[in-house]
Amino acid sequence: MTKWDDYVAGSPEAGSGDQGQRTGEWSGDAVATTGAALPLLALAACGGGGGDGGGGSTSVATPAGGTTPSAPIVVVTPPPTAMEASRFLAQATMGATRALIDTVVSRGYDGWLTDQFAMPRAITHYDWLYANGHAEEINRFKLNGFDPTMWRQLIVEPDQLRQRVGMALLDIFVVGVDGVINSWRSFSMAAYVDILLNNAFGNYRELMGAVTTSFAMSSFLTYFQNRKANPTTGTQPDENYARELMQLFTIGLYQLNMDGSLKMSGGQPIETYSQADVSGLARVFTGLVHPNFEDAPPRYLNPLVINAGMNETGASNFLGTTVSGGGMAAINSALDTIFAHPNVPPFVSKQLIQRLVTSNPSPAYINRVATKFADNGQGVRGDMKAVIRAILLDSEARTLPASGAIGKLREPVIRFTNWARAFGATSPSNAWAIGDTNAVTRLNQTKGRSPSVFNFYRPGYTPVGTALATSGLVAPEFQITNEQTVIGYVNFMYGVIANGIGDVKADYTNILTLAADSKALVDEINLVLAAGQLSSAMQAAIRGAVDGVSATASDGSINRVGIAILLTMASPEYLNLR
């Protein structure tokens, strides 16, 4: 009987807890080995060339006899191919499926976006926790239910565009559940993620307001029950939220042109705000408290309200403006001022492009999206639907880059959900016991568990001493990538692909029908998982490993499928989404 670990050579070592990883067959126990990094290293040697899929195509029809300055030019966009659809879904969802690829081919990009914008949420995270018994007293001081509801929605819910954009927003408006201090933390964090998802297709200004009055954010950034200055004791309002609202959520550190480039003065970038602006703005965010005193889950669902005794009603000066009078009116005035700042369109647009499409969008791409953020064409600023369409339908997103071009490193969590969605993973018990995957022996990332407000990685991060740094390019996801995490990821996915995790297991029924034909098998996995990005050389290398296992051997079919999936997910061409 062929051992799957023949292709993941090395000596066994301790796995990651609940997977029970030890040497065994593909169809039996999973294997965690230091040698599990070998497929990644070996495939890297095959070259990181581009896939064989075609890029986005546009044909131009002109009147007979050629064009003249006044002749209309009609741009006709043909339906996307399956590979083009898969690449689009790699940017717009938590992972493609064969059925979803077929839907995009049928509906077209714009039609699919329209369908997704119209799709309501099946159930909120907060309601799912309630429906599954997590409001029982025993869970008051536990995190039970939070990770399961997050994983479940990312993997199985059909509102995939909302899920992907919501996770992009969570990377900007960062809250990590471990930094939220209260009872019923699962509910308070669930309510916060619901805010992001519910507003993903709304208006950015409304999102700013909902985030500001969220208990989870107020706890994470320590402005819950923030008090006005006390002249007697010399205490001043907490400045955390005022600073991060400007620095991370809206305008950034330096003034920007609409294409994201820095505005300069005397050869130096111009700062957007000063410490005085932070102190002035902090006065506005005082007096925010719970609307009631009952310590039960609904307390963390409702927006915060103003306690007049804690709230500053005097003048607050920041960003060249003054607000006074206190209360929610002052907060709304402050948020309006920030939202109107010229930095908001390019600052937010660039980060959303980075999260969905590419780490290094061109200035022209940023400018096009930022322009749509500033005005959706109907005089509305901050229209998220318009911004999302602009990002995903832009020529820079839809045209396949040249071979070897830099796109973005796929986030570890998205790699996992790619697998889970591509192969129909389910949790029969509805427990979704995937858990916290922040450990370096797992994914080194879990949505909703960021260690700080700066996220797992910063949008401007560049690996030191690399060609990327020399070229002035950024690669945010590399901030959580190193030799140890690469080995941990391959080991973790080895066990997951083979055995699932908890009762979360894939359904390989359909892909097993292709197991005997290594070309058909690799072609299908390349399409659904890798968006057609595996080069001919990479596909040949994977087929060679697959063909090393007889399809007629005991467990041969499942071993061949497992090898093809793992080696694809470990390949540089899959890891770098172009």
Image (cartoon, helix red, strand yellow):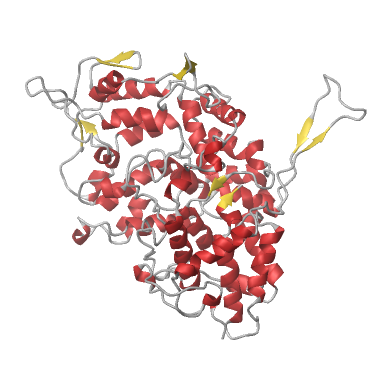
In this rendering, is residue 391 above or below 11? above
Is 507 left or right of 99, judged from the image as shown? left
Residue at figure coordinates x 25%, y 35% from the top left: 304
In this rendering, is residue 373 above or below 49? above
Q: Is residue 120 visible?
A: no
Q: Quadrant location of the N terminus?
A: bottom right
Image x and y of residue 270, in percent: 43, 18
Image x and y of residue 264, in percent: 48, 17
Near-viewer residue (13 or 215): 13
Residue at figure coordinates x 56%, y 65% from the top left: 39
Count up the numbered dots. 0
Identity of the residue furthest to the right in this view = 65
Near-viewer residue (460 or 170): 460
Is 489 left or right of 106, judged from the image as shown? left
Is 160 left or right of 480, judged from the image as shown? right
Image x and y of residue 88, in percent: 62, 47
**Based on the displayed image, in which of its 4 quarters is residue 133 positioned?**
bottom left
Q: Is residue 334 visible?
A: yes
Identity of the residue furthest to the left in this view = 232
In this rendering, is residue 503 above or below 89? below
Image x and y of residue 356, in percent: 53, 43
In this rendering, is residue 279 above or below 469? above
Near-viewer residue (144 or 342): 342
Near-viewer residue (471 or 83): 471
Residue at figure coordinates x 50%, y 37% from the top left: 352
Is 358 left or right of 53, judged from the image as shown? left
